[in-house]
Image: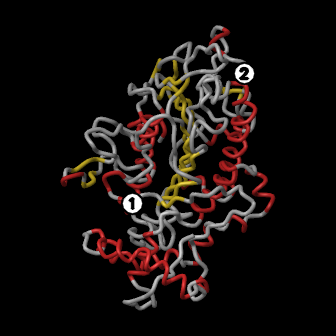
């Protein structure tokens, strides 16, 4: 737990010292990470017309054929076990494993021609879909949420960009996953919950109640001080220490802010609403995402899974430790169908959908031909993502894949175009330049890519 319990050799007007804060920063086992809170500048209230974003990241890579691009006329070994069903948009069909989504197709559009040509591993897809680029030449590009926070700042006492419930972990490679601020610096990294909101004992321990600061015992303060004083002495000589100095007061205000604590207070939601989203990690994360957006957070990423190895995910290779198509349909699809549909309904009912982009995407698709284990393997050749809300038009199908779901047939769309579309939807010029490494300007999205005009 994050605790302000160090001695105070130099005090600020709020009664705490910079050394207090450095002691806190020296503790590695935090329930919540705070780099964004230490550096973002409060911007105050913003006009309701400003657009926010919830990115649902479907770690593992959903099969396009078994989800939102069914191929009922394909051969048996391609079309899979599921039938297409009609939606509330004439002519748009999706897999029968998403009956709830079918009733809300007017609120989202399908982009069925997304592809990339990089290596078919999870990490590269994570990077490209969350930043619009593949990291190269030692440059890590910023997540869209980090870039948005850099350009527009945060609103009042809540973070600008929050990641739920945990960052993506081990997925078979050894590369960054694209959820950080990259070259913009750690101060624009996401505020990470690092907890399961579906846990019955869920709380956000690092947002301290005001009366906590006076309850710490003196001996504990002394032990902590002795443990980290040496490290602090060396740290204070570095340039980075000034950054901590500059942001100490803001960080403390945010961590002790009733508004910030209340934004994460999922227990304030009615039981019926929590049931409506589903009492799963993903369902409760989606509910928490709505709650955060409602209270001023600009961008929320929800990772449906943390890894592809320890549980049933979209990564349906068939053989262990993975699952097959049938198990995905029994567990993963209903979880997504319920939470995603409820999120769209809830945002709409609260008048938030018109100012909140909701996008759901995986890192790649799956091979059209079902493998001998009853699954499908990695395939970045083509896949489908969902996008709606805010200024994004719903009820459309953008692009199409070929008869086998192997490659784009019309309107091929690269990850950079997806990023540019989100930036435009957020009210940013996709080619606005950011200060890159060594002062070299780098645009939000590559100059060569444009937003998907059909979505506006």
Marker disc for residue 82: 2
Q: Is residue 453 visible?
A: no
Left or right? Give the position of 443 relative to 153. left
Q: Distance between the residues labelled 1 and 2?
A: 43 Å
Q: Nearer the viewer, mark 1 or mark 2?
A: 1
Mark 1 and 2 residues: CB-CB less than 8 Å, in contact?
no
Residue drawn where x is 54% and y is 30% of the image: 384
Left or right? Give the position of 60 relative to 173. right
Q: Position of residue 326 (x, y in %)?
A: 73, 25
The answer to which of marks 1 and 2 sits earlier in the sequence is 2
Residue drawn where x is 38% and y is 77% of the image: 229
Q: Where is residue 120 in the image (x, y as percent from the top left)?
A: 45, 26
Q: Position of residue 58 (x, y in %)?
A: 58, 39
Q: How crowded is mark 2: few (under 14 residues within 10 Å), some or many (20 or more)?
A: some
Looking at the rendered structure, the secondary structure element under dot 2 is loop
From this view, report whether residue 166 is shown above or below residue 335. below
Residue drawn where x is 39% and y is 60% of the image: 188
From this view, report whether residue 209 is shown above or below residue 296. below
Which residue was labeled with disc 1?
188
Q: Could you say which is closer to the camera, residue 15 or residue 141? A: 15
From this view, report whether residue 223 is shown above or below residue 130. below
Looking at the rendered structure, the secondary structure element under dot 1 is helix
From this view, report whether residue 319 is shown above or below residue 416. above
Q: Which image quarter is the N terminus in?
A: bottom right
Q: Position of residue 227 (x, y in %)?
A: 44, 74
Q: Could you say which is closer to the camera, residue 25 or residue 394? A: 25
Q: Can residue 271 be seen in this view?
A: yes
């Amino acid at each position: 737990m994050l605790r302000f319990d160090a001695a105070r050799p130099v005090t600020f007007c709020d009664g705490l010292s910079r050394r207090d804060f450095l002691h806190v920063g020296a503790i590695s086992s935090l329930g919540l990470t705070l780099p964004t809170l230490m550096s973002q500048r409060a911007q105050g209230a913003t006009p309701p017309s400003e657009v926010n974003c919830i990115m649902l990241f479907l770690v593992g890579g959903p099969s396009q054929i078994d989800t939102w691009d069914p191929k009922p006329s394909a051969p048996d070994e391609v079309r899979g076990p599921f039938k297409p069903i009609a939606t509330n948009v004439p002519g748009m069909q999706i897999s029968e494993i998403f009956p709830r989504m079918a009733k809300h197709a007017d609120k989202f559009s399908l982009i069925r021609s997304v592809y990339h040509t990089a290596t078919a591993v999870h990490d590269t897809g994570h990077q490209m879909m969350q930043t619009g680029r593949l990291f190269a030449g030692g440059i890590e590009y910023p997540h869209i949420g980090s870039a948005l926070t850099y350009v527009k700042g945060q609103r009042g006492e809540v973070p600008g960009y929050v990641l739920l419930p945990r960052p993506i972990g081990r997925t078979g490679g050894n590369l960054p996953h694209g959820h950080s601020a990259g070259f913009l610096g750690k101060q624009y990294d996401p505020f990470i919950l690092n907890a399961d909101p579906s846990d019955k004992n869920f709380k956000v321990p690092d947002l301290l109640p005001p009366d906590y600061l006076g309850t710490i015992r003196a001996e504990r303060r002394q032990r902590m001080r002795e443990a980290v004083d040496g490290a602090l002495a060396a740290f204070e000589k570095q340039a980075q220490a000034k950054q901590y100095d500059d942001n100490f007061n803001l960080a403390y205000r945010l961590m002790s802010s009733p508004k910030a604590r209340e934004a994460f207070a999922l227990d304030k939601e009615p039981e019926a609403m929590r049931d409506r989203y589903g009492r799963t990690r993903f369902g409760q994360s989606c509910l928490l995402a709505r709650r955060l957006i409602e209270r001023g957070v600009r961008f929320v990423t929800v990772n449906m899974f943390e890894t592809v190895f320890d549980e049933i995910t979209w990564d349906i290779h068939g053989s262990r430790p993975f699952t097959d198509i049938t198990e995905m349909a029994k567990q993963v699809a209903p979880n997504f169908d319920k939470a995603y549909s409820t999120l769209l309904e809830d945002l709409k009912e609260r008048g938030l959908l018109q100012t909140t982009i909701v996008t759901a995407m995986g890192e790649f698709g799956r091979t059209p031909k079902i493998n001998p284990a009853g699954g499908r393997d990695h395939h970045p050749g083509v896949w489908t993502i969902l996008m709606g809300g805010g200024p994004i038009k719903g009820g459309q199908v953008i692009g199409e894949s070929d008869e086998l779901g192997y490659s784009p047939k019309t309107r091929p769309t690269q990850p950079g175009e997806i990023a540019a579309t989100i930036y435009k939807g957020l009210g940013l010029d996709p080619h606005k330049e950011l200060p890159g490494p060594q002062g070299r300007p780098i645009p939000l999205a590559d100059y060569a890519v444009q937003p998907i005009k059909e979505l506006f």
